[in-house]
Amino acid sequence: MNPSKTGFEKKRETVAPGIVKTIDSVSNPTIKSIRGLVSQRKHRKESGLFVAEGLKLATDALDANWTVQTLIYGHEVREQEAVSQTAAKTRARGGTVLEVSRQVLSSITRRDNPQMVVGVYKQKTLSVDEIKPAEYAIWIGLDTVRDPGNLGTIIRTADAVGAAGVVLIGETTDPFAVEAVRATMGSVFHVPIAKCSREQFKKWIVNWPGQVAGTHLNGAVDYRTVKYDGPCFLLMGNEQAGLPDDMADTCKTLVRIPQAGQADSLNLAIATGVMLFEICRERLKL
Ligand code: SAM
């Protein structure tokens, strides 16, 4: 959708790119629009933008060639060299820089003790047809993941093992929600995210050239005994329902992580981490 069509975006246009503007009012239309990116998935979807907190994330984003649409920092940190360098890079690439009060930052981040730097970034996602499975690539498929903390943690763990990317399948939580972005600790800028419906996934995965391993509580195979050859696709189930039969049927192997004790399953992000480190053990000597 054309971002300029939304009411929020019409108001944003009053601040021209490339300039530094000072804003101290929480009811300023630009600030209201940025708050909308934090609180409303609909506004994130229509605008194609999202908010990430922290100077480190802004430098990560710039280093990884993401577009910083707006950089916002508090008056208190104006003199810090890292802040002025980041602001200069943002402006040089056509972004807007806003210097604001602590109250404005609190209103955006919904925190009494806010981060002093916040960025507004352009979302990036792929379609599954754009994925080119390289020989040693690991891709992670998440079926209808619901919890933003789980999703962010999985993106961070995927980054830690050098995975090629994450595919969000079906109706999932928003990877660009502030809670998910927070949990990625910056990895949202390093790990490609693809999106597809279950129907698209089922058609696409049949041509995957390597292992397709699904995790299932009733998996027939111990996850430590499988060969994760070639490009590896790891498919994880939903937090409540696990993998439904039609999705499990897309896998070449269904694996189980043996458990002791009374817990009926592992948390989704933990199970993904266990699997990823097993898959990479040989190929990366981790
Ligand atoms: N009640 C759900 C079920 O019956 O599958 C539990 C889902 S579990 C919280 C979320 C996902 O984590 C599962 O779909 C699976 O992908 C993975 N998982 C958790 N524990 C696992 C285990 N012991 N073995 C294999 N996969 C597991």
Image (cartoon, helix red, strand yellow):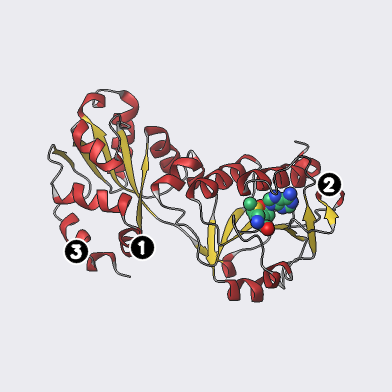
Front one among 83 and 232: 232
Would residue 124 appear left or right of 241 to someone viewing this image?
left
Dot 3 alpha-carbon crowd within 10 angstroms: few under 14, some 14 to 19, many 20 or more: few
Numbered circle sitting on residue 7? 3
Amino acid beneath label 3:
Gly
From the viewer's perspective, tell me whether residue 200 is left or right of residue 136. Answer: left
What secondary structure is marked by label 3?
A: helix
* Front residue of 185 and 254: 254
Q: How far is mark 3 from mark 1, CA to CA?
A: 13 Å
Where is residue 268 shown, x and y percent of the image? 62, 49
Tell me where residue 160 sits by quadrant.
top right
Residue at point 37% right, 35% down?
54
- Is the residue marked by circle 1 packed among few (<14), some (14-19), or many (20+) residues within 10 Å? some
User: Taking 43 as reference, is 27 above or below it?
Assistant: above
SS at mark 1 in the image: helix
| Amino acid type, callout 1 | Lys
Q: Amino acid at mark 2?
A: Arg
The answer to whether marks 2 and 1 mark residues whose Cβ atoms lie closer than 8 Å is: no
Q: Residue furthest right?
A: 225
The part of the image, by quadrant, that contains residue 1 is bottom left
Q: Position of residue 12 (x, y in %)?
A: 19, 55
Q: Residue at x 83, y 46 (%)?
A: 224
> Residue beneath label 1, please?
45
Q: Earlier in the sequence, mark 3 or mark 2?
A: 3
Check contact, mark 3 vs mark 1: CB within 8 A: no
Name which residue lies at 54% across and 47% down.
Answer: 150
What residue is shown with label 2?
Answer: 224
Which is more N-terminal, label 1 or label 3? 3
Residue 66 in view: yes
